[in-house]
Amino acid sequence: MGERLQVIKENHHWTDHVKKGRTKRLNIWEIDKFFKCPIVGACLTYAEQKQLLKKCGICTKNRTPYDIHEILVSACDTENPLSKKFENKLTQKFGKMSSILFEMDQEDFMAHWQECFEAGDYHEALWTAACRPDLSIENRREIFGMVHMGMHWNGEQRTICVAKIAGIEKREAAIRHKMEKLGGERKEMEKRNRQLQKDKQSLEVRLKTMVEEKNLLAGRLEKLESKSRVTELEQLAARLQTQREELSDTIEEQNRQFNKLSKENQRLSEAFDQLTAVNTQLQNSLLESIRNMQRINTCDKSCAAFDLCKKRVLIVGGIARMEMLYRQLIESSGGVFEYHEGHMKGGSKELENRLKRSDIVLCPVNCNSHAACTMVKNLGKKHNKPVHMLPNFSLNTVSQVIRDCAASPFSNSAN
């Protein structure tokens, strides 16, 4: 922050723009209403918000973050003990920096605001902008618009990260399962290799023993003078030779199997190493996605311009397997999700009950029957509910209608 201010001083002739005796800054209960929600959500951490409530004797037990946020935003409408403590806390955190920003002319201040917003460190500048009574309406609108659209962008990025993480976790589970299977096969191959090694050693011992016996018999044969004995020994030698050849063939076959298993073991080891590398890469990607999601500056759903907050959105029909994605889209925008498959065989009572308690009704025409579309239109007119007939069931179409509803919450698109 100090480096940015130094650049502004050098580039904009700081001493020429500092104005003494500027109008006194506004207190938190005196600023524009649309600035109060972003200031509560962005300038104080959740722990600091709870601490402020406790200092004023307000119990925070069993209260959600939204409850605490709502209490602080409401308290900022008037001068009261809680709003005063809130004002003092902001002064304690940002007072020194804000006093410098407060003395800038509007052109320098807006340039500084743009730089802070792009860097993601704009809390002091946001508070200063809200407290400056001399800031033009155009500059106020520009600052609020950037903060507001930044909240929408963060919600969209969070949805993308969640979907990406789910896909990575699924692929990681499949790879883990395959690695476990290959690990078991590798252990079985190693066990077979050890057994073949033992068999080979045993056969080599037997062969060595038989060679020694053959040599011993050959020596004895030379000493025998009896022809019959020589014949007998020759026959014995022939049998031993046959056994030796059989054993040699057996050893040769065992060696071939051993070499084959060794190659297979090497192949499995290489595959195991490759899968381990892929798994490590996926784990790193998963951690990076989690860090990206944690870095998202999630906005609070109590924003004054966020009209979908707490509204119940009913989707009739669509693709059933996309129900979870519809739910994530609507609930991440602050709405309450309701779903009906669009089947009319069981009657319209259940559809009518769901429509009666909904604030907004969405009906994709390309995946609903004509009877279902007509029924939704008639029920919307009967109960005076805004019905939007969508050309298709895509998330982009649903998201666009949700944004249109937030911009014009009382429109009815049934046709």
Image (cartoon, grey):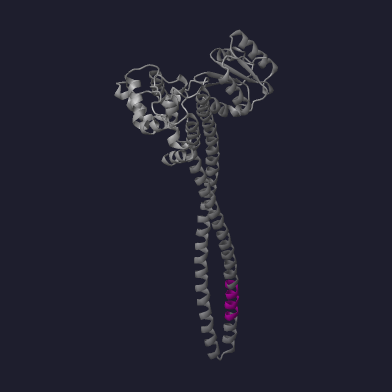
* Residue at x 53%, y 87% (from the top left corner): 219
Name the quadrant of the C terminus.
top right
Residue 243 inside the magenta-drawn segment = yes
Tell me where residue 384 appears, x and y as whole percent.
59, 9
Q: Nearer the viewer, residue 2 or 243?
A: 2
Q: Quadrant of residue 36?
A: top left
Is 177 above or below relative to 410?
A: below
- The magenta segment is 236-247
Residue 180 visible, this orientation: no
Judge whether 57 appears above or below 228 on screen: above
Q: Quadrant of residue 265?
A: bottom right
- Specify whether residue 356 is in view: yes
The residue furthest front is 16
Reply above or below: 47 against 72: below
Which quarter of the image is occupied by the N terminus?
top left
Q: Position of residue 284 (x, y in %)?
A: 50, 46
Tally the numbered discs.
0
Residue drawn at point x = 56 percent, y = 16 percent: 409
Q: Where does residue 276 sit, x and y in percent of width and height?
A: 52, 52
Closer to us: 350 or 293: 293
